[in-house]
Amino acid sequence: MSEPRFRWGIIGPGNIAKAFRDGLRDSRHGVLAAVATRNPGRESLAADYPAVRVVEGYEALLVDPEIDAVYIALPHTGHARWAIEAARAGKHALVEKPLGVTAREADAIFAAHRAASTFVGEAFMYRLHPQVATLVELLVAGAIGEVRMIQSSFGFQMPSFIPEHRLFAAQLAGGGILDAGCYPVSMARLIAGAAVGKPFDDPVHVVGDAQLNAEGTDSWSAAVLTFASGVIAQVACGTMIRLDNVLRIHGSAGRIELPDFWFAGGNRDNSPGQIDIVRNGERETVRVGASAHLYSYESDAVAEAVTAGRVEFASPGMSWADSLGNARVLDAWRAQAGVVYPFERADSHPLETTAR
């Protein structure tokens, strides 16, 4: 007999949700059972999610007995509220990055799922791809000697500044730091951890700055993270800048390069995994040979964790402590850059809507 399938529901059927949908088609354990939306009459839903149940309202999905876990793909300001509501409903949750707008939100999410004994994880899809485990193995084995410096960027050029767009709008926690900068920060912390034999490490010092737009959110930004081990990471991001988007890890004996590491050497549909090691002027390419959809790995990792009775990802996935550390770095980077959202100034945080 085949094993029972892990039944997923999606909250917020936007573009990133369609990537998760495609990942489930390649999943070993999961199946998409339903999609929740506040506009079930939208014409595109039938084409985007053929033969998938569409339910009206996110609450309806959370009380659905045919759903094992939810994937939360809303704008940033909706992540904490619905992750907490999922815990209250007894549902496991995978939350698109960033887990919350702030470390405070992340902590509240973990408290809710700890109380409910349900799984919750931050959806950094690249962390579960085999490329990352291979990268950590190479670093631990001394492929480039002692790790000294990390350089990583994630920046793209939007066609124009659109104040109401989620990437810019202050009320939606827009800006490059939360949307794109979270990737190089999470990778830098992973590498710094591998350098000292830990799943991750947190910097002891963060210095950052940004160019702000008319919404007061960051259009491009950079930061330096200093770790107690001596490792220094330079990270950069932006929504209005074409950065090279290459991860470079410099060591005492060479360097490692990974272009667009979050796509694992390809894209969402085809991410085979490729790591370039440069030593003494010669380049060696390590090919991981992965074949599944990039987003299939995180869905399977959730199902495997739940089956094993765990409430968080195993390394190199983002554990609760890892996600909380990442959020604290992003908080510090934003503070240094002067990015303050209106709800933070007004002391009326969106998280308060979950209070009962």
Image: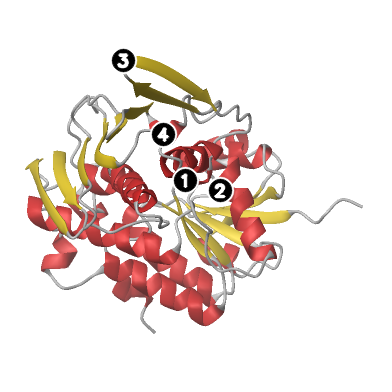
Label 1 and label 3: CA atoms lie apart by: 29 Å
The three-letter code of the residue at mark 3 reads Gly
In the picture shown, does residue 266 fall above or below 60?
above
Look at the numbered discs 1 and 2 and tell me whether their residues touch, using CB distance below 8 Å: yes
Which labelled disc corresponds to residue 127? Answer: 1
**In the depicted structure, whether residue 313 falls above or below residue 288:** below
Label at residue 281: 3
The numbered dot on residue 143 is 4
Is any part of residue 175 visible from this angle? no
For marks 1 and 2 on the same chain, the one whose residue lies earlier in the sequence: 1
Task: Report the coloring of the rendering.
Answer: secondary structure
Sequence order check, earlier mark of 3 and 4:
4
Q: In the rendering, at what x and y percent does residue 267 appear?
A: 48, 27
Q: Earlier in the sequence, mark 4 or mark 1?
A: 1
Depth check, front residue: 159 or 2: 2
Task: Kindly check if marks 3 and 4 are in contact, taking CB atoms under 8 A apart as contact.
Answer: no
Question: Could you give the CA–CA distance between mark 3 and mark 4, rounded to whole angstroms?
Answer: 14 Å
Question: Nearest the camera: 148 or 99?
Answer: 148
Residue at the spot 40% in from the left edge and 55% down from the top edge = 197
Label 3, secondary structure: give it.
Answer: loop
SS for callout 1: helix
Instruction: Give the structural element (helix, strand or loop) at label 2.
Output: helix
Residue on which the image places disc 2 = 298
**Residue drawn at (52%, 77%), measured in percent from left and top?**
88
Frontmost of labels 1 and 3 is 3
Which amino acid, by three-letter code, is at mark 2?
Answer: Glu
Q: Is mark 4 in CB contact (under 8 Å) with mark 2?
A: no
Please tell me whether mark 1 or mark 2 is closer to you in this view: 1
Left or right of 96: which side holds 6?
right
